[in-house]
Amino acid sequence: MTTAVTLDGVSCVFGSPGHEVRAVDGVDLRIEAGEFFTLLGPSGSGKTTCLRMIGGFTLPTAGRVLIGGQDVSLQPPYARPVNTVFQDYALFPHMSIRDNVGYALMVRKVSKAERMKRADELLALVELGGVGDRRPAQLSGGQRQRVALARALISQPQVLLLDEPLGALDLKLREQMQSELKALQRRLGITFLFITHDQHEALSMSDRIGVFNQGKLEQVGTPQQVYDAPSTRFVAHFVGAANVLDGDVALRLAGRPSAMLRPERIRLGAAEGARATGAVREVQYFGAFTRIKVDAAGTLLQADLPGAAAAPLPAVGDAVHLHWDGGAVHALASGPSR
Amino acid sequence: MLAPPAAGLQRRVSDLLYTRRGLLLLALLGPPLLWFGVIYLGSLFALLANAFFGLDDFTGQVVREFTLKNFVELTDPANLDVARRSITMAIAVTLACTVIAFPLAYYMARHASGAGKALLYIAVMLPLWSSYLVRLYAWKLLLAKEGAINWLAQQTHTAWLVEGLLSLPAIGGPSLSFSAIGTFIVFVYMWLPFMILPIQAAIERIPGSYIEASGDLGAGPAMTFFKVILPLALPGIAAGSIFTFSLTLGDYIIPQVIGDSTLYIGQVVYRQQGVAGNVPFAAAFSLVPIVVIGIYLWLAKRLGAFDAM
């Protein structure tokens, strides 16, 4: 495998001296060709700035950006072999859909006939044949998103950058677009660099995930690695729900100074052999599962009980006995100070 | 529980306006619509209706009988000349204002921020705070043969340039303040803010992501300018040009104070209704700018200037 994108000690600092904001702080990252790579993080964590430095809209203050082995750190966007699907789609309102999709070819002086033909092919690829003559304002949000995708793909970029492209869509449409995007990526074999703050999206679509926090990459790994073996407390909390235990509690319950236990790994059971016992403080019904919060000797533990569990659900105030397998506990590297 | 407030008159009026939205709308829009519809448009149409009346040559009284005499008179070569001169000046002033205003408007909209932006706004608006006549006579002094501009030209050894300009036929003259060039310069100065502000507003409305998307798709700065920024700024240019165009067509003071004493539409209208007392002909002549601007707007729409609105 070759490397599609390399970030080499990349930093980006905004603001005047004394009031500096380190949006991206010394990030090293390699994204392999053909990968579906997701940058996941809360808003303001630096993931979008990172994407903008790869696209060329923001220049790094330190470090190098390489695309396909070429140093593009200081190149303007139009010289880079990447294309972007913008968060607001950024379709040109004064052009027809076909002209929008064919824009990159118009820039390269491709003949009008060829341009129109290719634009229609791309529109068919995103299942939007027949809307070529319309204006962006006449399409729905989901359709606009597909046009933005077609427009970014027409010049066959080495890397496609997607900046929270599904954020503006409603839940049903978002889930449909998630699987379509994934299928499209597999079919085209283009490297996708996807930005999101939605952990479900990141887990379900990506080959690998990079978790961002405060300008730094906390962990890079497959969805399974990030979910099952988070390397920091931040990752444990941000990706999925987690019981993070520290100090004496962690030593007593998990046998380690700092540990994480996913709520769905906890079961209810008999008093005998229970790892913890306590009173139920809260019961939240989610349909597929029910989340209870148990006060186990001063430590609040979350447990997700499957909806199909035939046993009657505990009520607030009930005393319950919690069980889990030894393998369910994951030791965390960093202490409680972070 | 709180006791409901006493049901006074104020309360009942408030309830009525809340439940009857039409009444509220009427109360809010009535006065401005009355002003605009009756006083503003009404007086304009009353004036225009005058264009179809005649003047008794003997008594000088307006004869309230339908006639097209005034419009026939408009086609008189001298009057056509006035119209042609005014329209040419209006076009030249509009083009110059656009070219000068665009870079500044672009800078204000996309690059300036904070105090710098406020300062630019004030700099653009400041001239409008002082009297138009004061600025006009200031320009008369600047453009005069003994004025600052000539002095500066002599100091920088560019007097030949001014001389050359003034020796041009039709637009030249004895000095800048007595030439069509001078009239043009002052027109451009006077109406420039009316061009800068709409263009600035239009450019400010273009999301930064459009410009980034254009670059992302391979377009260099020039291509992005001509394919994305300029088309989206066109409604602003159109709005600004309506101001500069119609203000130039209607003005009668600037060409009176600065210029080669040839007449413009505004001056003819002023003289006909003031000195000559020929309100019907003045009304007919004032139809010319209205028709010209109507045609201009129709053309602008045909060319797609408002598509991005």
Image: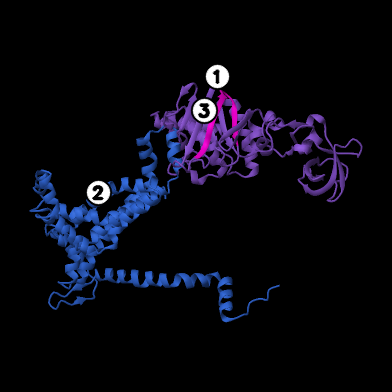
Chain colours: A purple, B blue
**Quick check: B148 above or below B64?**
above
Residue highlighted by disc 3: A9
Chain letter behind tag 2: B
- Tell me where residue A236 sits by quadrant: top right
Is residue B242 in sight in this rendering?
no
Which amino acid, by three-letter code, is at mark 3?
Answer: Gly
**Residue A109 screen position, x and y as percent:** 38, 29
- Check if mark 3's residue and mark 1's residue have beta carbons within 8 Å: no
Chain letter behind tag 3: A
Residue highlighted by disc 2: B96
In the depicted view, which residue is nearer to us: B105 or A66?
A: A66
Is residue A139 in sight in this rendering?
yes
Q: CA distance from mark 3 to mark 1?
A: 20 Å
Q: Residue at x 54, y 37 (%)?
A: A46
Magenta span: helix, strand or loop, mainly?
strand
Q: CA distance from mark 2 to mark 3?
A: 50 Å
The disc, 3 or 1, on the residue closer to the chain's N-terminal end is 1
Residue mark closest to the camera, 3 vs 1: 3
